[in-house]
Amino acid sequence: SPGDVLIDGANSYYKDSMRRAQRVEAAGVNYVDAGVSGGIWGLDNGYALMLGGSKQAIGQVEPAIRVLAPGPETGWLHCGPAGSGHFVKMVHDGIGYGMMRAYSEGFALMKAREDFDIDLGAVAEMWRHGSVVRSWLLDLMSDFLDKDQQLEDVLPIVADSGEGRWTALEAIEQGVPAPVMSLALMMRYASQGGDEYGAKLLAKMRQGFGGHALGKEKAP
């Protein structure tokens, strides 16, 4: 009904949110796009909330936002007009792609130096205190590396849920360089098998010009 407020709390594409807001507001209904971060831990620790919409719309939902956020005055932000909340969340997730890729590469480098026999769990735990690379992601790594550093039961496949793609597309559209976030997205595609055919072509070209042997499939 006119005067109501509609909240999109999913990680929608911000351009869709802008379009939907126009349609909803034309019917006299206020619209809020809410980018939500915090994962499964948000229920206990509060959710980081990135909100787009008019001041009137935000005012209508502010009492609930203050309860859902980590604190009444912290962990939430009215980012701007409709679409801006999902836009900020999109960039937030693109940054997360880059951070996770950097952590994974760094720890893989340390694991590869077998002669040092580095305790990766101990490194992650140490970095959590005073280091410039400390983060919640590092907290999570410290926890699971303390239990298992080989990760033999984990398939090396990383899904992508859309926000990384949208961030890379936005960088292209605006002409703003975002190589770290874009490359992190490409590496997720590679983990999903998107690089397999290209790698086979590379192997065959190398065999063609240099006579190099082709690798064999690993035994099951």
Image (cartoon, rainbow, N blue to C red):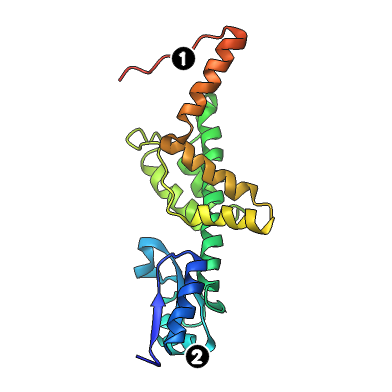
Asked if residue 134 can be seen in this view, the reply is no
Quadrant location of the N terminus in the rendered image: bottom left
59 or 168: which is nearer to us? Answer: 168
Residue 180 place in picture, x, y as percent: 62, 47
101 or 57: which is nearer to us? Answer: 57
Q: Earlier in the sequence, mark 2 or mark 1?
A: 2
Residue 52 place in picture, x, y as percent: 52, 77
Residue count near mark 1 (Cα–Cα under 10 Å), binned few <14, some 14–19, many ≥20: few
Outermost residue, top direction?
211
Q: Which mark is residue 56?
A: 2
- Quarter location, residue 10: bottom left
Q: Secondary structure at mark 2?
A: helix
The three-letter amino acid code for the residue at tag 1 is Gly
Residue count near mark 2 (Cα–Cα under 10 Å), binned few <14, some 14–19, many ≥20: some
173 or 171: which is nearer to us? Answer: 173
Q: Is residue 57 above or below residue 111?
A: below
- Distance CA(mark 2)–CA(mark 1): 63 Å
Q: Is residue 58 above or below residue 156?
A: below
Residue 82 placement, left or right of 66: right
Outermost residue, left direction?
220
Residue 47 place in picture, x, y as percent: 42, 70
Asked if residue 188 can be seen in this view, the reply is yes
Residue 119 place in picture, x, y as percent: 48, 36
Residue at 53%, 42% (x, y): give it. Answer: 186
Q: Which mark is residue 215?
A: 1
Q: How many marks?
A: 2
Residue 202 placement, left or right of 34: right
- Quarter location, residue 208: top right
The three-letter amino acid code for the residue at tag 2 is Gln
Residue at 39%, 81% (x, y): give it. Answer: 6
